[in-house]
Image (tube, rainbow, N blue to C red):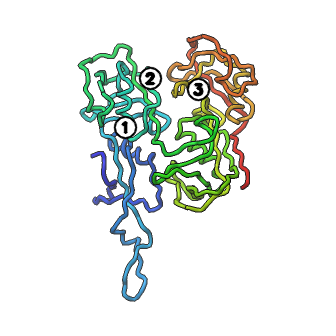
């Protein structure tokens, strides 16, 4: 019941869902999976509709022959029917749940290891695990049995498991998988900076954005996909010698780069260079330069304790994100206690928050996280080709 052609009921009849304008994306497909109580979306495919509906054909001569005006396609979705990640920042991250007897249950973190994580990420069609941890989450996890995966199994419920029925610390497992490796930044100082390239049909090529006003949008999608921080800049740089490129059309309305790429073998004289923050980000704010401060350590994003956070620390963060100067910061209670308790001791001149000195403090007495607003909206450089 969790894979196949997508249909919807119209009056008393079931009809295939047709994607005439290519509006369907993985986020929409994931909503369908959750609506029918399946897990997370694993794949989205489109197949040519061989029988266009009557409203999509036209008579064009006296012989009353018909030809399709459009080429409507049908939507096929595959969902995971036994595992899902919920409450994460993207489709391949979140709190792990399994379905048993049609009920979704959070999974205890006791004994959960890399082999278990590898099975989950592969089952969901995501890349390899980039981080996992136990977190307190409201109620105790309902699934206490320990998984004993070897890492090669096709699904988590295919793994051996123990007979344990308790979860001593009462923590649930949260997991982050990398997305499939089809986007990369090359030639920069880190994996979060450089020339944007995409693998399409098995071939890596640079990306050319037809509308330069879309540069920052494309950069933002790229940074999110690579699990980097927010986009700091998106600049067109001259590229010699000229080479073929994949093109991003100016009319694309999808949420992933993979769905926006156009097969166009025209050569380019410039390419898009993207810089993302690779260690800090602001989440949940009103714009790209505001929100709850998080830092990335060992590939895991952690909220930052507000104890001792001062103006010099804020100046470093705002500058690192290309967001101007700080216009306000405060400590706020936010669900769980912050994972990053160490106090930063910035002088205000450092190039990045993790370059600052810090204390050995490992507790956060008030349990509050720092939220920060910088004066800028976003930084994006566009150099005409």
Residue at numbered disc 1: 122
Q: Which mark is residue 247?
A: none
Residue 51 horizontal/vertical position (percent): 33, 68
- The answer to whether residue 331 is left or right of residue 127 is right
Dot 3 falls on a residue whose secondary structure is strand
Locate residue 354, reporting x and y percent.
64, 23
Horizontal placement of 158 versus 328: left or right?
left
The numbered mark, 1 or 3, whose residue comes first in the sequence reads 1
Q: Position of residue 317 (x, y in %)?
A: 68, 28
Per the image, label 2 sits on a secondary structure element best described as strand
Q: CA distance from mark 1 to mark 3?
A: 26 Å
Q: Is residue 103 visible?
A: no
Q: Residues within 10 Å of mark 2 (few under 14, many from 20)?
A: some
Instruction: Judge whether 112 appears above or below 92 on screen.
Output: above
- Residue at left offset 44%, top offset 73%: 69
Residue at the (61%, 34%) spot, across then down = 190
Name the outermost residue toward the front: 241
Q: Is residue 94 visible?
A: yes
Residue 164, how many percent across, how many down? 26, 17
Most extreme residue toward the bottom, as rendered? 62
253 is higher (above) or lower (below) than 351: below
Q: Which residue is mark 3?
A: 295
**What is the CA distance from the residue labelled 1 to the residue labelled 2?**
18 Å
| In contact (CB < 8 Å): disc 1 and disc 2 | no
Image quadrant in which the C terminus is located? bottom right
Q: Is residue 99 left or right of residue 378?
A: left
| Helix, strand or loop for disc 1 | helix
Q: Which residue is mark 2?
A: 133
Front in this rendered view, residue 191 or 319: 191
Residue drawn at (33%, 16%), measured in percent from left and top?
167
The local crowd at label 1, few if under 14, some if 14 to 19, many if 20 or more residues have their Cα within 10 Å, is many
């Amino acid at each position: 019941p969790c894979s196949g052609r997508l249909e919807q009921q119209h009056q008393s009849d079931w009809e295939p869902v047709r994607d005439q304008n290519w509006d369907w994306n993985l986020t929409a497909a994931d909503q369908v999976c959750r609506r029918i109580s399946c897990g997370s979306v694993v794949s989205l495919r489109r197949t040519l509709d061989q029988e266009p509906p009557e409203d999509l054909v036209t008579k064009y001569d006296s012989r009353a022959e018909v030809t399709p005006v459009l080429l409507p396609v049908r939507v096929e979705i595959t969902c995971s029917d036994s595992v899902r990640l919920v409450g994460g920042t993207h489709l391949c991250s979140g709190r792990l749940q399994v379905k048993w007897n049609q009920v979704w249950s959070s999974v205890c973190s006791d004994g959960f290891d890399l082999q278990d994580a590898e099975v989950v990420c592969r089952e969901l069609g995501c890349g390899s695990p980039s981080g996992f941890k136990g977190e307190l989450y409201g109620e105790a996890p309902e699934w206490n049995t320990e998984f004993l995966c070897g890492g090669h199994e096709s699904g988590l419920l295919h793994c051996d498991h123990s007979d344990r029925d308790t979860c001593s610390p009462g923590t649930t497992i949260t997991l982050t998988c990398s997305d499939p490796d089809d986007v990369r930044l090359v030639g920069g100082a880190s994996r979060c900076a450089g020339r944007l390239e995409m693998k399409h049909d098995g071939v890596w090529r640079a990306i050319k954005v037809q509308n330069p006003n879309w540069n920052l949008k494309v950069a933002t999608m790229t940074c999110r996909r690579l699990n980097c921080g927010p986009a700091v800049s998106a600049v067109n740089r001259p590229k010699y010698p000229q080479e073929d490129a994949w093109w991003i059309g100016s009319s694309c309305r999808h949420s992933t780069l993979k769905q926006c790429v156009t097969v166009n073998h025209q050569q380019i004289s410039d390419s898009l260079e993207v810089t993302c923050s690779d260690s800090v980000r602001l989440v949940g704010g009103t714009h790209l330069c505001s929100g709850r401060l998080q830092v990335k350590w060992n590939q895991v994003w952690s909220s930052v304790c507000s104890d001792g956070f001062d103006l010099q620390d804020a100046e470093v963060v705002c500058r690192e994100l290309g967001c101007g100067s700080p216009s306000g910061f405060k400590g706020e209670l936010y669900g769980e206690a912050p994972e990053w308790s160490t106090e930063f001791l910035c002088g205000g001149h450092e190039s990045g928050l993790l370059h600052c000195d810090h204390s050995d403090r490992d507790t956060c007495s008030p349990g509050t996280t720092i939220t920060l607003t910088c004066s800028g909206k976003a930084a994006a450089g566009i150099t005409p080709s």
